[in-house]
Image: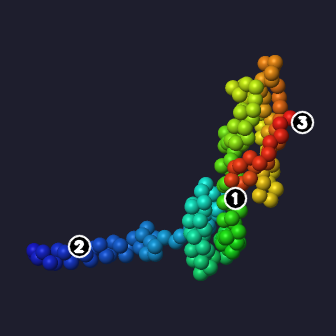
Amino acid sequence: MKLSRKQKIWAVIIGIVVVYGILSETGLISKQKPQRNYVAEATALIKDLRNPTSVEGLKSDYQKAEVLYSEMKNVKDNSDAFISASMELEALTTFKDKNIEIETRKLKIKKLFSSWDGSNYKLEQYLKKHMNDPSSYQHVKTNYEIKDDKIIIYTEFRGKNAFGALVLNNAMAVQDLDGNLESVKVGN
């Protein structure tokens, strides 16, 4: 018996449906689309919100966080990880504007200091300009604290004195958040 072209096509279609049904029943093919891993998405987003690299990225991440949190409110998952991630996203998005302000301020301050040795760019320029031998400048360490809208900077450095000896010295400076030095005091 010879099958017509139409009969062959139907035989192939029926065969595909039967094979698909068998594979679906055995679990080798899922009928549902894969479920999102909300905990992993939220955890990655929370990490980005807590360690932003730019203001634009931070604002974009907060928009994503609001959407994700909104979706998570409609998901039935009672696992501790899901509840914890959802609560943290809720807290972050509830205080979004304040958090963006705080993180923006941190980013602004971070740009004033070297990521390599922690020195303050403007203070280092000032010190070199006022040294006997600017080429002898060696940064030792820098610490700072923030008071209101001012940064109080404490730095130790080495440099040659008028006699050519390499000496340890220190400086304290006050800088505004825009990077302008307001005062510098060198020595004890």
Question: Residue 8 location in percent, x, y?
Answer: 17, 74
Up-down relation of residue 103 to residue 186 (above or below): below
Measure how far apart labels 3 and 1 are at the Cα level.
30 Å
Rendering quarter of residue 143: top right
Tell which tag, 2 or 3, sits nearer the viewer. 3
The residue beneath circle 3 is 188
SS at circle 1: helix
The relative height of residue 130 versus residue 9 in the rendered view (above or below) is above
Q: Is residue 187 left or right of residue 89?
A: right
Look at discs 3 and 1 and give the one toward the viewer. Answer: 3
- For image coordinates 73% across by 41% down, the residue present is 123
- Residue 40 left/right relative to 92: left
Query: Within 10 Å of the Cα at label 1, are there few (<14), some (14-19), or many (20+) other Cα atoms?
Result: some
Mark 1 / mark 2, whichever is N-terminal: 2
Q: Residue at x 78, y 51 (%)?
A: 151
Mark 2 surroundings within 10 Å by alpha-carbon count, few (fewer than 14), some (14 through 19), many (20 or more): few
Q: Residue furthest right?
A: 188
Identify the residue position indicated by label 1 in the image.
Answer: 105
Amino acid residing under circle 1: Arg
The residue indicated by pointer 2 is: 12
Identify which amino acid the numbered label 2 is placed on.
Val
Q: Above or below — where is 133 with respect to 89?
A: above
Residue 77: x and y in percent read: 63, 76
User: Which one is in front, 41 or 126?
Assistant: 126
Q: Earlier in the sequence, mark 2 or mark 3?
A: 2
Residue located 19% across and 75% down the image:
9
Residue at 71 percent of width and 28 percent of height: 134
Image position, residue 181 (x, y; %)? 74, 47
